[in-house]
Image: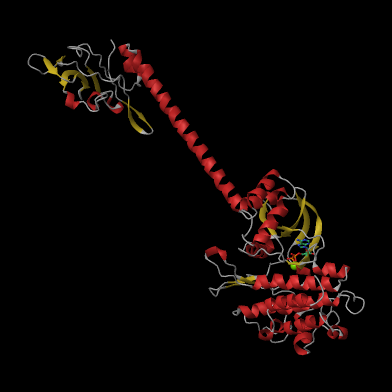
């Protein structure tokens, strides 16, 4: 018999789900007569459906009830709740409805599930294949649907994540084009990115994920320098040269500080070393801290001047670009939310921490001791006690008189060191005669590796400064350069010029003079 038995629900991990068979057909016009257990003449008439209910009582006795259900009781009309029973109750309750003709519920097969047996048992016992295969199909269907939903959610998650990282990458300075080159591993990509980031003066660097990717793909070629903290290597990434500075974990604070400084928004400048990436690699035994920057094959200003004398345009170019870089570092840019830049003091300015670019401009490097100051009045002092290179320390530091709470005083420390570096450049300049051999400042006054006491004796007590050659004062542009040096190494830090003043004066010198740089 084609019945419209609707059997209870299936319990799944998601709660009770109704098993719904054929839709209930409404009674024909004029209604139908049903078997009715409790009615006086054992029948009832209805405009709805005939109902049969089988109940296992507490004492185990199974009782069958037949009855009528009125049309208004059928909700929802196709699969009325009163014709359904919960799966959890299938061993004690079974319901069937029909409306296919008078007394249709007389022969309606409504059976309880066998106690402790699974869903198909009742159907098997009735010999109705619909119950067994229908329930099974439904379970399979639900499991399949759940799997499909989970797969879709996972796919959506992956899609959103990829879109997020791509957007991050695309937002990075350098834009989409450079990102594409980077992804395709094309040579020139890094230069394009770093170049774009530098000229736009915008961001704080590449997204961290890309930084890490680059760092993990670099191959080291050979060592190129050694400073206070790290060994510096020439590295190669996708055919491009980059510098890799490695710190030991002992100097983690310095690595962190330098990375933090380079990632300062708007720090990028043509006269500051171009930061590319930072990474910390842990192989389980040791941690390597890496800092990747642009590589400058001419090396440090110290290396360059040791090898090569400079002519007047070269001297002016080096001096101007150095002052330009330092002025940018020192300058605070007050901007809306993240768009500002704190003032930064270098605190270890010297010719070994300045690189020479191929266009003979300086790029200030080694921000391991730098301190930042923003207009909130906060000076972000490093957590180490190193105070720069003794040879380049100004009188107030040698005398332990530096006012660390006043940022102008901290910048004046850099200006004193700037004066010494300007002197190093001018000393190596062929001006009114052949260039002198390279000399460190105070080379004739202190030993190779002076201590604070020796430097103090020369700089504070004797008030000695690097010697200004007589012929320098005879004409421009050296005259002005001499004046700048003197005004930058005054004993009184407050009397010293600012880096910006030095930059502007050299710019004027070039603009009004007949030397092109
Ligand atoms: P440290 O913090 O250990 O003093 P520096 O950053 O000053 O390290 O680098 C040490 C030396 O390595 C520099 O004096 C310079 O000779 C060389 N060097 C550093 N960075 C670069 C670079 N980007 N390109 C070329 N040479 C570099
Ligand atoms: Mg250094």
**Looking at the picture, does residue 333 appear above or below residue 263?**
below
Q: Position of residue 56 (x, y in %)?
A: 22, 22
Ligand 1 image-quadrant field: bottom right
Look at 62% across and 60% down and name the residue there: 204
Residue placed most toward the observer, 124 or 97: 97
Q: Position of residue 90 (x, y in %)?
A: 28, 24
Q: Quadrant of the C terminus?
A: bottom right
Which residue reaches farthest left?
A: 40
Q: In this image, 264 relative to 454: left or right?
A: left
Between residues 228 and 249, which one lies in front from this camera angle? 228
Q: Nearer the viewer, residue 136 or 512?
A: 512
Say above or below: 287 vs 373.
above
Is any atom of residue 425 visible in this view?
Answer: yes
Relative to 249, 68 lies left or right: left
Residue located farthest toward the bottom when viewing the structure as drawn: 462
Q: Is residue 391 visible?
A: no
In the rendered image, the quadrant that contains the N terminus is top left
Residue 348, horizontal then vertical, whole percent: 72, 72
Q: Is residue 352 above or below residue 27?
A: below
Between residues 344 and 35, which one lies in front from this camera angle? 344
Q: In the image, what residue occupies the spot 79% across and 71% down? A: 318
Q: Along the horizontal axis of the image, is 120 left or right of 99?
A: right
Quadrant hosting residue 102: top left
């Amino acid at each position: 018999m084609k019945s419209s038995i609707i059997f209870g629900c299936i319990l799944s991990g998601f709660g009770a789900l109704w098993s719904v068979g054929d839709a209930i057909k409404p009674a024909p016009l004029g209604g139908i007569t049903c078997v009715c257990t409790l009615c006086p003449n054992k029948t009832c008439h209805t405009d709805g459906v005939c109902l049969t209910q089988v109940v296992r009582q507490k004492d185990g006795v199974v009782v069958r009830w037949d009855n009528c259900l009125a049309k208004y009781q059928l909700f929802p009309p196709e699969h009325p709740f009163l014709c359904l029973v919960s799966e959890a109750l299938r061993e004690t309750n079974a319901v069937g409805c029909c409306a296919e003709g008078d007394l249709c519920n007389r022969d309606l097969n409504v059976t309880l599930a066998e106690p402790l047996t699974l869903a198909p048992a009742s159907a098997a016992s009735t010999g109705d294949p619909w119950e067994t295969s229908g329930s099974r199909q439904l379970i399979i269907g639900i499991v399949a649907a759940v799997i499909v939903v989970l797969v879709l959610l996972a796919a959506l998650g992956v899609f959103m994540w990829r879109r997020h990282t791509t957007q991050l990458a695309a937002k990075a300075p350098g834009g989409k084009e450079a990102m594409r080159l980077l992804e395709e591993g094309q040579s020139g990509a890094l230069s394009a990115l770093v170049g774009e980031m530098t000229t736009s003066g915008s961001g704080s660097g590449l997204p961290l994920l890309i930084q890490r990717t680059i760092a993990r793909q670099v191959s080291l070629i050979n060592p190129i320098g050694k400073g206070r903290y790290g060994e510096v290597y020439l590295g190669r990434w996708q055919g491009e040269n980059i510098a890799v500075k490695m710190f030991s974990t002992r100097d983690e604070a310095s690595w962190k500080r330098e990375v933090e400084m380079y990632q300062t928004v708007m720090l990028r400048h043509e006269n500051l070393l171009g930061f590319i990436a930072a990474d910390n690699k842990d192989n389980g035994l040791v941690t390597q801290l890496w800092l990747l920057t642009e590589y400058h094959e001419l090396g440090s200003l110290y290396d360059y001047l040791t090898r090569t004398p400079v002519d007047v345009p070269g001297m002016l170019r080096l001096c101007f670009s150095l002052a330009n870089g330092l002025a940018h570092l020192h300058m605070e840019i007050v901007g809306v939310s993240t768009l500002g830049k704190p003032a930064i003091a270098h605190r270890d300015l010297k010719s070994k921490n300045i690189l020479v670019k191929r266009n003979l401009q300086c790029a200030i490097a080694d921000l391991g001791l730098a301190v930042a100051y923003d207009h909130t009045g906060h000076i972000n002092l490093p957590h180490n006690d190193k105070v720069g290179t003794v040879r380049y320390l100004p009188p107030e530091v040698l005398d332990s008189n530096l006012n660390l709470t006043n940022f102008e005083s901290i910048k004046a420390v850099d200006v004193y060191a700037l004066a010494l570096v300007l002197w190093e450049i001018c000393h190596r300049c062929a001006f009114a005669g052949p260039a002198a051999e390279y000399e460190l400042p105070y080379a004739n006054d202190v030993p190779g590796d002076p201590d604070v006491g020796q430097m103090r004796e020369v700089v504070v007590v004797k008030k000695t400064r690097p010697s200004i050659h007589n012929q320098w004062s005879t004409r421009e542009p050296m005259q002005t350069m001499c004046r700048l040096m003197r005004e930058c190494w005054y004993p009184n830090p407050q009397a010293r010029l600012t880096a910006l003043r030095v930059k502007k004066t050299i710019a004027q010198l070039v603009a009004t003079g007949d030397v092109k740089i």
